[in-house]
Image: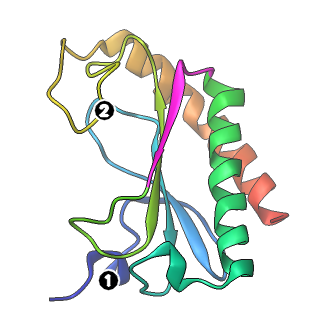
Amino acid sequence: MICPLCAEDGGMLVWRGERLRVIRANEVGFPAFYRVVWNAHVAEFSDLSASERAHCMDVVVAVEQALREHLSPTKVNIAALGNMVPHLHWHVIARFEWDSHFPSPVWAAAQRPSPVAQEDAVWSRLPALEAALRDRLARC
């Protein structure tokens, strides 16, 4: 079986560096759901060298900071699961108290309908967020 994160970007490509990339995932109800994906196929964070781990976390932090600065979410969730796709990637997700699943994880059952107006407001801010993120990551 071919790894889906080796075969394609895994979402809308925001930025690609030599070692990793940032994509916006297509997750219904969560417009600000990003992934930091290691370009080479490795399964675990401990497969990376110390300098690679530091670089990876610098990028995760940059994504989190951009989400906080541009969207002011209630919380930012960060997770590295890889149970379904054993290719190292970090989920960085802006969460809002109005989102359909809050305060439960995005993978839990929805607790309420998705609020279209609030989601649209987030969608409208993503171009500026992603431009600022690309600028920040160009310096990483």
Q: Nearer the viewer, residue 97 or 5?
A: 97
- Tag 1 secondary structure: helix
Dividing the picture into quadrants, the one containing residue 115 is top left
| x, y percent for residue 119 | 39, 20
> In this picture, which residue range is highlighted in magenta?
72-79
For disc 1, the marked residue is 7
Q: How many marks?
A: 2
Q: Earlier in the sequence, mark 1 or mark 2?
A: 1
Residue ID at (63%, 20%): 72
Instruction: Report how far apart the C-alphas of labels 1 and 2 lie in the structure.
Output: 28 Å
- Tag 2 secondary structure: loop
Residue ID at (18%, 15%): 111
Residue ID at (47%, 36%): 32
For disc 2, the marked residue is 105
Q: Specify whether residue 77 is painted magenta.
A: yes
Counting other residues with Cα less than 10 Å from the Cα at mark 1, is it few (<14), some (14-19), or many (20 or more)?
few
Q: Which quadrant would the N terminus be assigned to in this image?
A: bottom left
| x, y percent for residue 87 | 36, 76
What predominant SS class does the magenta segment belong to?
A: strand
Q: Nearer the viewer, residue 94 or 116?
A: 94
Three-letter amino acid code of the residue under disc 1: Ala
Q: Specify whether residue 83 is painted magenta.
A: no
